[in-house]
Image (tube, grey):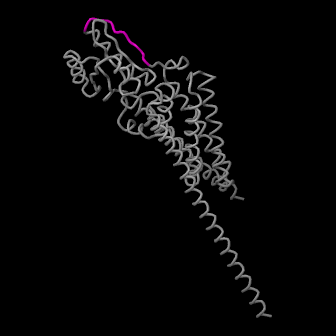
């Protein structure tokens, strides 16, 4: 009769250990999100931010060198011959501001490239113009769509598509664990079509984040989403309950922070700036910007990034398929070995009974 309380206590302790072990995941998410977001966003500061000074005379050269020296690495200042060349640099994202000195100084920016970078540049040259006793006129050579006045709508679209993608991984990997991997991979591709269609609807008819190029945006959203889903479904074979933490590390902590959707790499610590060159979120954000605002300049490189992540997803699924096939083979071998042992044991018992008779 005394076994009752002891049994209940053991059951409670076991359940508590189970809960505590599962709490490790959200606590690690908390640490990871804090390190990633605060590390990337808490103190944005320019470094090697490219700006142009328009003019070829001594005055322009002196101003450019003065800004370069005063910035102490914050700016990368060059001179360009004329206003048209400066505008071309802005439209090809070779610079993020162009200052035209004179009695009526003008600052040229392209907010579609990065509103925060344009704000930093405007602050710098407002002070320059003030030192010269003149008000600064700002010209936006490539503004964002009317539905995206802050220029950050594409980033929040990235967030929506990412969440729809990596959250679906948990469902397909968990609830669909009994399904063959090829079926799970098919579900991943089908889900990516739905997620990307939702993203395109948000970007176009719902919020008007873009006013043209919606088809190309949808294609990049699909490629981006499919890469996440395939990688996640493949990783679930190996990570199991740690899959959620794994995909959040890849596609939230490192992804959102390096995408350039809020701050371009020139305003971030070097680690996140380095990730920007090859991470899939940056490929999507910069690809959409290139397609919608900059006439497809450098679009091929961004599409290559998204395609390589998609191929990586196919590779991970293939490796997972091989691992699952090996596990099934090993399980079948164990079943056959167990059956053989039982058959041998039964035969020996029957022989002993026969000898005894």
Looking at the picture, how far across and down is residue 67, in whole percent? 24, 20
Quarter of the N terminus within the rendering: bottom right
Answer left or right for 210 relative to 176: left
Looking at the picture, how far across and down is residue 220, in whole percent? 55, 36
Our reading of the magenta stretch's main secondary structure is loop
Answer left or right for 71 relative to 228: left
Looking at the picture, how far across and down is residue 178, in whole percent? 69, 54
Quarter of the C terminus within the rendering: bottom right
Residue at 47% x, 32% y is 286
The answer to which of 25 and 227 lies nearer the viewer is 227
Answer left or right for 105 relative to 204: left
The image quadrant that residue 332 belongs to is: bottom right
- Image: magenta residue range: 132-141
* Residue 20 visible to the viewer: no
* Residue 61 visible to the viewer: yes
Q: Is 135 a magenta residue?
A: yes
Looking at the picture, how far across and down is residue 112, in whole percent? 46, 22
Residue at 34% x, 21% y is 85
Residue at 42% x, 17% y is 141
The image quadrant that residue 142 belongs to is: top left
The image quadrant that residue 331 belongs to is: bottom right
Q: Give the number of callouts.
A: 0
The answer to which of 193 and 38 lies nearer the viewer is 193
């Amino acid at each position: 009769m005394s076994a009752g309380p002891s049994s209940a206590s053991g059951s409670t302790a076991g359940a508590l250990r189970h809960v505590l072990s599962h709490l490790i995941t959200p606590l690690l998410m908390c640490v990871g999100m804090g390190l990633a977001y605060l590390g990337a966003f808490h103190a944005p500061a320019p470094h090697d931010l490219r700006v142009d000074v328009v003019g070829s005379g001594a005055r322009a050269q002196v101003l450019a060198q003065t800004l370069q020296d005063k910035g102490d690495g914050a700016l990368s200042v060059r001179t360009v011959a004329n206003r048209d060349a400066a505008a071309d640099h802005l439209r090809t994202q070779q610079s993020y501001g162009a200052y035209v000195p004179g009695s009526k100084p003008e600052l040229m920016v392209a907010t579609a490239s990065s509103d925060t970078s344009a704000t930093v540049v405007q602050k710098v040259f407002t002070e320059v113009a003030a030192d010269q006793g003149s008000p600064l006129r700002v010209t936006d050579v490539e503004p964002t769509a009317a539905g995206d006045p802050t220029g950050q709508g594409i980033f929040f679209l990235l967030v929506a598509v990412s969440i729809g993608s990596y959250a679906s991984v948990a469902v397909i990997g968990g609830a669909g664990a009994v399904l063959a991997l090829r079926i799970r991979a098919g579900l991943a591709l089908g889900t990516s079509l739905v997620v990307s269609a939702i993203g395109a609807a948000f970007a176009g008819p719902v919020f008007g984040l873009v006013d043209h190029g919606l088809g190309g945006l949808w294609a990049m959203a699909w490629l981006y989403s499919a890469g996440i889903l395939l990688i996640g479904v493949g990783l679930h074979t190996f990570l199991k309950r740690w899959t959620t933490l794994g995909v959040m590390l890849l596609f939230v902590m490192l992804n959102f922070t390096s995408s350039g959707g809020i701050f371009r790499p020139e305003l971030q610590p070097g680690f996140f700036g380095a990730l920007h060159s090859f991470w899939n979120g940056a490929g999507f954000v910069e690809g959409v910007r290139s397609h919608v605002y900059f006439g497809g300049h450098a679009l091929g490189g961004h599409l290559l990034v998204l395609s390589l992540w998609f191929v990586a997803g196919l590779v991970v699924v293939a490796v997972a398929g091989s691992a699952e096939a090996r596990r099934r083979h090993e399980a079948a071998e164990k079943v056959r070995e167990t059956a053989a042992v039982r058959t041998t044991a039964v035969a020996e018992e029957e022989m002993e009974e026969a000898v005894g008779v």
